[in-house]
């Protein structure tokens, strides 16, 4: 008589680290949030051209909801450096992490613009904090590049976020009366943006970027668009029109090469498509919104940007909720 087979339960899984909330929150959640904030500001501006319609109220309501979303995402990510500050360096070593961490600070600068009509003093403090944090991140990124592998020291569109991102500050500073400071920031950041454009064009001529990284090329649209918007706010009409035409040229090139740009299919890097389109729509409204053609074009870009950004943000947040986003972007953990 054969002895019956015995079944033993599998051993319990080994726990490599103590459980905790938000130990691997991916910074990739912030670029689409940045796009949503930019779109909210664009819809607020459109409301100025459409008084007596529901647009102004809807824009303010949307901005309130997006601000809450950003606050939640910020708390979720800050849980990591509060546990272990060194995780920030680890995030900056990876391109998606670098873009996401910088975008989290730029969201703070955009949030200051949202607060200007409601709490000017708080907006001023917030934009000052955002600018200081961006300076610190710029130094850390340079340190990471200097101590990292040589092949990682190439210029990427993410450089615009790190070193030109200060151009968002005048969106808050100009309405608060700091025009001279805003003019200085615009001049310096546009010179930096020009150097990045030139370096990126040379690299693109010499080597075609891999398909998964091509969506990042859309970031080149953001500095031209913001240059147009801030020039218009400062009253520099000629410069505003010049930057706006440059933005439209870059946007046209991106649309024409759209199939090549998105060849790799959807990825979290599609977040890089969101905020430049929002910035471009806002720039067209600011510069050309006084004419019907400009108002229509800016409105169409705003609608298209809303559809794209909402889709990207929803897919990114769903991937975060499922736990896939951290692995796909190689987010650091604590």
Image (cartoon, rainbow, N blue to C red):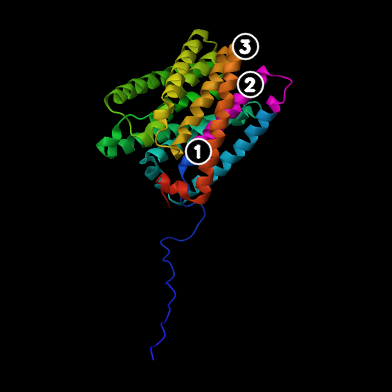
Is residue 145 in sight in this rendering? yes
Q: Which sits earlier in the primary sequence, circle 2 or circle 1?
A: 1
Question: What stretch of residues is rendered in magenta?
Answer: 31-57
Q: Which sits earlier in the primary sequence, circle 2 or circle 3?
A: 2
For residue 271, above or below residue 178: below
- Return the x and y of residue 94 as percentages of the image width and height: 37, 41
**Residue at 39% of width from left, 18% of height from top?**
191
Task: Indicate the quadrant where residue 98 lies.
Answer: top left
The residue that disc 3 covers is: 292
The residue mark sitting in front, 2 or 1, is 2
Discs 2, 3 touching: Cβ within 8 Å: no
Which dot marks residue 46?
Answer: 2
Is residue 184 in sight in this rendering? no
Furthest toward the front, the residue is 1
The residue that disc 1 covers is: 30
Q: Is residue 237 magenta?
A: no
On-image quarter of the N terminus: bottom left
């Amino acid at each position: 008589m054969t002895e019956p087979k015995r079944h033993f339960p599998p051993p319990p899984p080994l726990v490599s680290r103590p459980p905790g909330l938000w130990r691997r929150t991916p910074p990739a959640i912030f670029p689409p949030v940045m796009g949503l904030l930019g779109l909210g500001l664009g819809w607020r501006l459109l409301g100025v051209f459409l008084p007596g319609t529901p647009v102004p109220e809807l824009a303010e309501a949307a901005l309130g909801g997006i601000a809450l979303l950003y606050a939640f995402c910020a708390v979720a990510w800050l849980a990591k450096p509060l546990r272990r500050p060194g995780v920030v360096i680890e995030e900056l070593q990876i391109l998606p992490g670098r873009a996401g961490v910088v975008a989290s600070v730029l969201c703070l600068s955009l949030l200051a613009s949202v607060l200007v009509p409601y709490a000017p003093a708080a907006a001023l403090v917030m934009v000052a904090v955002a600018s200081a944090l961006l300076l610190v991140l710029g130094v850390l990124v340079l340190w990471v590049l200097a101590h990292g592998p040589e092949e990682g020291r190439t210029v990427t569109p993410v450089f615009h976020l790190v070193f030109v991102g200060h151009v968002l500050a005048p969106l808050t500073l100009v309405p608060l009366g700091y025009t001279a400071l805003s003019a200085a920031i615009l001049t310096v950041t546009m010179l930096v943006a020009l150097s990045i454009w030139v370096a990126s064009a040379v690299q693109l001529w010499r080597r075609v970027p891999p398909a998964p990284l091509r969506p990042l090329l859309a970031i080149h649209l953001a500095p031209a668009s913001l240059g147009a918007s801030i020039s218009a706010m400062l009253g520099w009409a000629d410069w505003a029109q010049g930057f706006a035409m440059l933005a439209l040229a870059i946007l046209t090139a991106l649309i024409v090469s759209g199939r090549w740009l998105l060849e790799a299919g959807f990825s979290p890097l599609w977040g890089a498509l969101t905020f430049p389109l929002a910035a471009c729509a806002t720039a067209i409204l600011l510069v050309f919104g006084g004419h019907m053609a400009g108002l229509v074009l800016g409105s169409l870009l705003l609608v298209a940007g809303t559809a794209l950004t909402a889709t990207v943000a929803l897919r990114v947040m769903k991937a975060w909720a499922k736990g896939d986003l951290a692995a796909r972007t190689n987010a650091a953990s604590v």
